[in-house]
Image (cartoon, grey):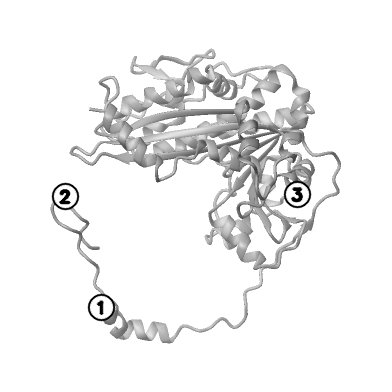
């Protein structure tokens, strides 16, 4: 690898003739000569199924959530680094949405829809050489995460939703305590701790120090005392998007559950929380199953815009899309064809997913990779998936065609609008945030 540019001297340039020695290598030449053209184009057996007949009218209310983040680094020593995170929730009704031109939406029409129906949240994390209230980066980020979920601009509703999920307050028998989690002060002995009785913070019974309810998510497991990875910001963004969406769900669950039968909840990205953050997955699964059993199926959809599943769908179609068809890949298919790994071990999504993968093709111009919750155990579903187990699948397929945008490839208008609020572009957003950070952090 070449040397990067420094403060006083330029970077080392890569060799313009370095490839010549590679081509002269006897081993390389032998390997390349033995490459063969494929005998025949690979044929993958995909059981496309036609859309079920619509059983109801499109869902009336649409909630869409999206998020963005940017890390900025100071240009002067000690090169402090701060990550900014922003999330947004949009509420749109189908009547207003139907009046928007999908090809050339009028800016004033978009402004009118977003004026009273958009909510956003913003926060910032010191990743390196920046301090908060005199705390180390480790303790500062723990406190910022706790205070950010209590964001006063959202009247603390996101924290209420977090507690509602993890304490299972929606149940007739809520949890008396959180599942045990690693104490943020127990790095050496790894002792476990918990909180009880709907508490937001308390004292660890092992070490006697203050802990927060947000510590159960495990952000401290990927931080050092004086620095943190950018993955902390991306994980927080994903979790906050999830909680923001379920805040809308909780509102109607507690006030008027009948409205939930007319709502569609859209999330940018898969319905998934990885690694230690997957502690939130099981409470979400349990609530969705409970709501379904009570006759209030929650219509939630996550759309993947990029990644291996999107690439695989494009490979499958190759320009010849079977219109109005869908395909649900099982565990074997996902492992062998999409992830290119052995199918041994736990079923795909065992701990991390609260929605199943579905490839959906509306027409040759709109093909989507969706995540949809199921009314079954994830392990059983992913090994033998059935469309009837996808919650509100027919309503979702009936509603989404009215939201397809002509501005971007495979885009949905509500997610476009949520992204327009949440987006932090590399330029000029990152430049503005860098100036802001330099002006306020000393």
Residue 386 tag number: 3
Residue 284 tag number: none
Q: Is residue 172 left or right of residue 433?
A: right
Q: Which residue is mark 2?
A: 7
**Mark 2, secondary structure of its residue:** loop
Asked if 110 appears above or below 37 in the picture, the reply is above
Tag 3: Cα neighbours inside 10 Å, few (<14), some, or many (≥20)?
Answer: few
Asked if 114 appears above or below 230 in the picture, the reply is above
Whether residues under marks 1 and 2 lie with C-beta atoms below 8 angstroms apart, the answer is no
**Mark 1, secondary structure of its residue:** loop
Task: Work out which quarter of the rendered image holds the N terminus and state it.
Answer: bottom left
> Which is more toward the observer, 341 or 394?
394
Tag 1: Cα neighbours inside 10 Å, few (<14), some, or many (≥20)?
Answer: few
Tag 2: Cα neighbours inside 10 Å, few (<14), some, or many (≥20)?
Answer: few
Residue 17 tag number: 1
In front: label 3 or label 1: 1
Instruction: Kindly tell me whether residue 256 is visible in this rendering.
Output: yes
């Amino acid at each position: 690898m070449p040397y990067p540019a420094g403060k006083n001297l330029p970077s080392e340039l890569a060799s313009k003739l370095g490839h010549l020695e590679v081509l002269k290598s006897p081993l390389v030449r032998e390997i390349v000569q033995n490459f063969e053209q494929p005998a025949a184009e690979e044929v993958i057996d995909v059981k496309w199924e036609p859309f079920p007949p619509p059983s109801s009218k499109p869902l009336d209310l649409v909630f869409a959530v999206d998020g963005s983040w940017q890390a900025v680094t100071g240009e002067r020593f000690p090169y402090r680094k701060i990550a900014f995170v922003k999330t947004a929730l949009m509420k749109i009704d189908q009547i207003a949405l139907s009046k928007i031109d999908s090809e050339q939406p009028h800016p004033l029409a978009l402004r009118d829809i977003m004026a009273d129906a958009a909510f956003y949240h913003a926060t910032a994390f010191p990743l390196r050489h920046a301090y908060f209230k005199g705390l180390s980066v480790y303790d500062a980020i723990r406190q910022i995460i706790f205070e950010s979920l209590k964001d006063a601009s959202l009247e603390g509703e996101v924290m209420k939703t977090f507690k509602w999920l993890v304490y299972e307050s929606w149940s007739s028998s809520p949890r008396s305590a959180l599942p045990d989690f690693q104490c943020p002060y127990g790095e050496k002995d790894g002792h476990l701790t918990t909180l009880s009785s709907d508490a937001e913070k308390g004292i660890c019974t092992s070490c006697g120090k203050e802990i927060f309810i947000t510590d159960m998510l495990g952000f401290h497991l990927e931080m050092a005392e004086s620095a943190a990875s950018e993955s902390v910001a991306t994980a927080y963004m994903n979790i906050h998007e999830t909680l923001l969406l379920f805040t809308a769900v909780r509102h109607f669950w507690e006030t008027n559950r009948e409205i939930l039968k007319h709502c569609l909840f859209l999330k940018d990205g898969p319905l998934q929380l990885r690694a230690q953050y997957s502690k939130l997955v099981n409470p979400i699964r349990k609530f969705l199953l409970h709501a379904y059993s009570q006759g209030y199926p929650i219509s939630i959809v996550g759309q993947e815009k990029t990644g291996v599943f999107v690439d695989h769908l494009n490979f499958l179609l190759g320009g010849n899309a079977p219109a109005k068809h869908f395909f649900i890949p099982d565990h074997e298919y996902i492992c062998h064809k999409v992830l290119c790994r052995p199918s041994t071990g736990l079923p795909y999504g065992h701990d991390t997913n609260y929605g199943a993968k579905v490839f959906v093709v509306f027409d040759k111009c709109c093909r989507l990779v969706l995540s949809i919750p199921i009314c079954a155990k994830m392990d059983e579903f992913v090994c033998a998936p059935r469309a009837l187990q996808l919650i509100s699948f027919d309503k979702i397929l009936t509603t989404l065609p009215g939201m397809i945008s002509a501005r971007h490839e495979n885009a949905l208008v509500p997610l476009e609008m949520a992204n327009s609020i949440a987006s932090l572009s590399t330029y000029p957003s990152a430049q503005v945030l860098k100036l802001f950070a330099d002006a306020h952090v000393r």
